[in-house]
Image (cartoon, rainbow, N blue to C red):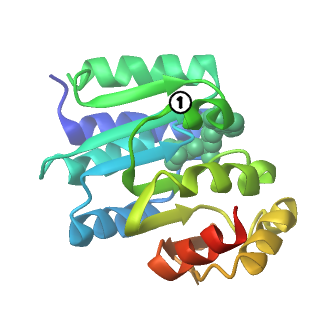
């Protein structure tokens, strides 16, 4: 089996050469810390790209009983994901789904501790709406690049406001900031009351 650090280096080089928009090292460290302190066991990632972020999550998730599901739209990218999973002997632990997350999420019959959204920004609202029901109570949703692509996500900001959903915007790195949210009982009750 290829050594982990060598593998991560290889993925990083691929990113630089091919301009894959992977999360930054600072963001990776923050998300890994979240996984660590929350003892995440079941995580969903939307937008796998070449799997750089997923491998970062895996480095934490493997320390406890865990599962990772990652969805990718692009066929060539998901092919790389499958090759990477095979190279790391993780076929039985990581689920890689190829398809449009908007159609794939409703087919998933499980709930998650942590959902990381790093995909087509202009559909964030639609996607968030689908994913919200898949997150366990008192667990986490993180949306990447919320300031850089703020204008593309205008309806998402409106949606958060309308649904009185509370969140924090965290300046994790120079590249962009993330939206961090914990799904609470109060949020859920408000949505049920409003019949969303
Ligand atoms: C910013 S990249 C993800 C980077 C990755 N999380 C990382 O840090 O290594 C966004 C990815 O989302 C994928 N994507 C875009 N729209 C999608 C959709 N509707 N469903 C699933 N994946 C999608 C793109 O093909 C792209 O690979």
Ligand 1 shows up in which quadrant of the image? Answer: top right
| The N terminus, quarter of image | top left
- The residue drawn where x is 50% and y is 59% is 24
**Secondary element type, mark 1:** helix
Q: Which residue is mark 1?
A: 107
- The residue drawn where x is 27% and y is 41% is 67
Residue 9 horizontal/vertical position (percent): 35, 41
Question: From the viewer's perspective, is 146 left or right of 90?
Answer: right
Question: From the viewer's perspective, is 100 left or right of 84?
Answer: right
Residue 68 appears in the rendering: yes
Q: Quadrant of residue 105?
A: top right
Residue 176 appears in the rendering: no
Residue 96 horizontal/vertical position (percent): 43, 27
In this rendering, is residue 144 above or below 181?
A: above
| The C terminus, quarter of image | bottom right
In this rendering, is residue 191 above or below 99?
A: below
In this rendering, is residue 137 above or below 101?
A: below
Q: Quadrant of residue 101?
A: top right
Residue 171 horizontal/vertical position (percent): 57, 80
Pick whichever, 28 or 162, lies toward us: 162
- The residue drawn where x is 59% and y is 72% is 179
In this rendering, is residue 47 above or below 136?
A: above
- The residue drawn where x is 17% and y is 46% is 62
Question: From the viewer's perspective, is 154 left or right of 94?
Answer: right
């Amino acid at each position: 089996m290829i050594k982990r650090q060598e593998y991560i280096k290889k993925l990083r080089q691929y990113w630089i050469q091919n301009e894959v928009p992977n999360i930054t090292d600072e963001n990776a460290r923050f998300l890994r810390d979240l996984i660590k302190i929350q003892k995440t066991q079941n995580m969903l990632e939307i937008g796998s790209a070449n799997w750089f972020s997923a491998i970062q999550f895996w480095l934490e998730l493997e320390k406890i009983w865990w599962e990772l599901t990652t969805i990718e739209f692009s066929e060539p990218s998901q092919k790389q994901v499958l090759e990477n999973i095979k190279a790391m002997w993780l076929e039985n632990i990581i689920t890689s789904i190829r398809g449009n997350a908007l159609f794939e999420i409703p087919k998933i019959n499980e709930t998650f501790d942590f959902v990381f959204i790093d995909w087509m920004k202009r559909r964030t609202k639609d996607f968030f709406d689908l994913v919200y029901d898949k997150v366990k109570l008192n667990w986490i949703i993180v949306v990447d690049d919320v300031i850089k692509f703020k204008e593309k996500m205008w309806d998402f900001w409106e949606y958060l406001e309308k649904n009185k959903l509370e969140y924090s915007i965290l300046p994790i790195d120079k590249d962009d900031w993330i939206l961090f949210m914990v799904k609470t009982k109060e949020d859920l009750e408000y949505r049920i009351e409003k019949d969303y």
